[in-house]
Amino acid sequence: MRQAVLNLEESMIRQVANAGMGRADVLRFWFGESDEVTPAFIRDAAVASLQQGETFYAHNLGLPELREAIARYATGLRCAGAAPINADRIAVTSGGVNALMLAVQMLVEAGDEVVAVTPVWPNLTAQPAIMGAQVKCVSLKPMAGEWQLDMAELLAAITPGTRLLIVNAPNNPTGWTLSRVEQEAILAHCRQTGTWILADEVYERLYYEPTPNGCAPSFLDIAAPEDRLVVVHSFSKSFLMTGWRLGWLVMPPSMTPHMGKLVEFNTSCAPVFVQRAGLVAIERTGDVTPRVVAHLKTCRDTLVPLLQAVPGVQVAPAKGGMYAFFRLEDQARFGDSLETAKRLVVEAGLGLAPGNAFMVNPGPEARGWLRWCFASQDLARLGQGVKRLDRWLGL
């Protein structure tokens, strides 16, 4: 077996979840998904597709009508002056994870240097490592109550020898989001160094700051179609479709035919009935996403003040995403966050994700950090969870 695969660590989030699976008394906030079922009209579209016998292969790049719908949707979210996004830049994928892996397979070879902004969802640093790349991390820093990026440090890390920059904004787990000025500086610098940008923007619509188009700043607002930019999106978060495994890529049009070849050797295509569900979801986004975003903002605004009132907890409201990333201040008391998260499951009946799951080679700075997914239909569950945390800290 390849050493790069042998070196992979089991998902720390899964390790915590496995410790609590089957226990009815555990409040589960470990996974990054809402507990709300996919809307009926989306499920009905998949059922209708199956009843019509659409159980065969589709085009590698996705149904033409879905690619066209995604192109219209993505173009409609762009700010004034942005280049329109045509269907020849779209590939439909079997989930956002698959989209990310396809992009890495397309761009990264063994020995390449990849720069990643962390903390970040662990797949984004594991995927280039699987390909044999050397991953160099630039860490966000909590300053003045919120996470910030040291732009000078990031730009210094990206050199002509850097093949790929991976950046996730809005960020999982911190909620940090790139500003337009930061995006412009990164794009200009990567144009100079010849570095590709892989932008994970799956939380683009889950953004709580006021903007004209109702979403976070995107590299697609400022990039030209042929820029070395690949953007990943997913139906999972803003359309309540995590289990459906449907996503898409936006890329330079010259890359798209080659991406079709790569899809063939990975999954052949996304299932047609799943794509039919995605088509209805994106055509009726107004019936889903605004309500989801409004509810998630209420969840955030419910949870964060409760956490801030707990002695020994440091937390700031996230600008985007569906997570509170918080720190337990008493570092002498807690070991690494994986052990802390496991203890919380067993001793408090509270399921959270460990902070060091989102950091490469985590050191002492990872201690005490935990991620809480606040996407809960029942706001009272959030309050119950905070009470369990407060009681456990007081023991």
Image (cartoon, grey):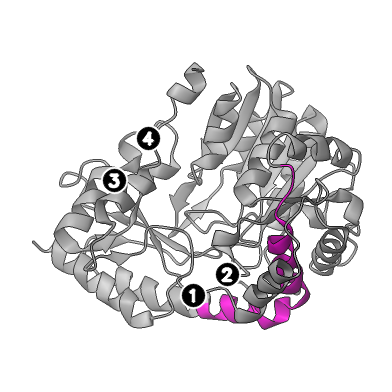
Quadrant (top left, top right, bottom left, bottom right) of the C terminus: bottom left
- Chief secondary structure of the magenta span? helix
Q: Give the range drawn in magenta.
A: 268-295
Which one is in front in this view, the residue at disc 1 or the one at disc 3? 1
Q: Can residue 207 be seen in this view?
A: yes
Crowding at dot 1, Cα within 10 Å, few <14 / some 14-19 / many 20+, comes out as: few
> Which of pointers 3 and 2 lies earlier in the amino acid sequence?
2
Crowding at dot 3, Cα within 10 Å, few <14 / some 14-19 / many 20+, comes out as: many
* Residue 267 pos. (x, y %): 69, 42
Left or right side of 54 for 324: left
> Which of pointers 4 and 1 lies earlier in the amino acid sequence?
1
Residue at numbered disc 4: 362
Q: Is residue 289 visible?
A: no
Do the residues bearing badges 4 and 1 touch, measured as CB atoms within 8 Å?
no
Residue at numbered disc 2: 240
Which one is in front in this view, the residue at disc 3 or the one at disc 2? 2
* Residue 199 pos. (x, y %): 68, 47
- Checking the image for residue 264, the label placed there is none
- Looking at this view, is 58 or 301 the one in front? 58
- SS label for mark 1: loop
- SS label for mark 2: loop
Which residue: 44% across, 79% down? 377
Residue at numbered disc 3: 337
> Which of pointers 1 and 3 lies earlier in the amino acid sequence?
1
- Checking the image for residue 36, the label placed there is 1
- SS label for mark 3: helix
Q: Which amino acid does label 2 sit on?
A: Leu
* Residue 306 pos. (x, y %): 31, 75
User: Is residue 23 covered in magenta?
Assistant: no
- SS label for mark 4: loop
